[in-house]
Image: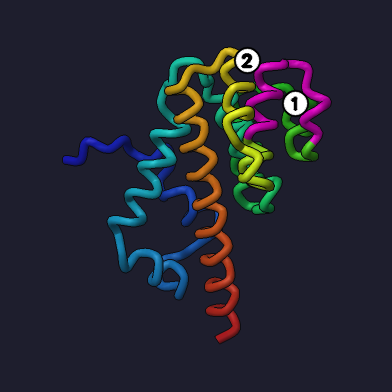
Amino acid sequence: MSNMPSAPHDTDTLDRVLGLLPGSIAHQARHQRSKVVDATQASENLLLGFPIEGLSIQDRLLVALLACSLTPSSELSREYTQRLESLNTAKDLIEKVRQLNIQGISDVRLKQILTFTHTLITDPVKADKQALLTLQASGLTTPQITALAQLIAFVSYQVRVAAGLKAMNAWGAQQ
């Protein structure tokens, strides 16, 4: 038995949100390397499903939503919106993040987290020492900043894998 956390759904997130059905070209290609599929889902489970002191699941889901809105990935954006709604996150907060209106967020700490997320995704050179010091000034510790950066990197990876699978799925449907 694996010591990795189990997925919160019957299938992994990418298969489920992209509608990848067993037998489809994209599903077959993806599942040729089951270790990668399992590790991708385990990473999501760890980063978004388990407690991280000082970074609530809501904060982390808002980061994921922002990353998906910036890239964009409509399927993953919908997924993270639904998860936020299930936590009873304020609809206006979700909408501000979806619309990239970070300045409209009144919670200073959350605004700094989302600003860092935006910067790391859109202009990574500016996610420098000063950006990290700003996060520390807003109360984040080094382990929390590290977890935040790992989450941003993971969602960026997840979005890119989703885009590739979506393209494969569309190509397979044309064959």
Q: Is residue 144 left or right of residue 68?
A: left
Q: Is residue 56 left or right of residue 82?
A: left
Q: Residue at x 45, y 75 (%)?
A: 25
Magenta extent? 101-116
Label 2 crowding class (10 Å Cα cut-off): few <14, some 14-19, many 20+?
A: some
Q: Residue furthest bottom?
A: 175
Q: Nearer the viewer, residue 165 or 67?
A: 67
Q: Nearer the viewer, mark 2 or mark 1?
A: 2
The image quarter in which residue 116 lies: top right
Q: Where is residue 117? Give x, y as percent.
A: 63, 36
Asked if disc 2 and disc 1 are in contact, CB closer than 8 Å, the reply is no
Q: Nearer the viewer, residue 96 or 120?
A: 120
Residue type at the position of mark 1: Leu
Residue type at the position of mark 2: Ser
Number of marks in the image?
Answer: 2
Identify residue for label 1: 93
Identify residue for label 2: 138
Mark 2 secondary-structure assignment: loop
Q: Residue furthest front?
A: 129
Mark 1 secondary-structure assignment: helix
Residue 110 belongs to the span the image colors magenta: yes
Q: Where is residue 158? Give x, y as percent.
A: 51, 51
Above or below: residue 49 compared with residue 2: above
Q: Residue at x 77, y 30 (%)?
A: 102
Label 1 crowding class (10 Å Cα cut-off): few <14, some 14-19, many 20+?
A: some
Q: Is residue 130 left or right of residue 57?
A: right
Q: Earlier in the sequence, mark 2 or mark 1?
A: 1
Q: CA distance from mark 2 to mark 1?
A: 19 Å
Q: Residue at x 44, y 40 (%)?
A: 44
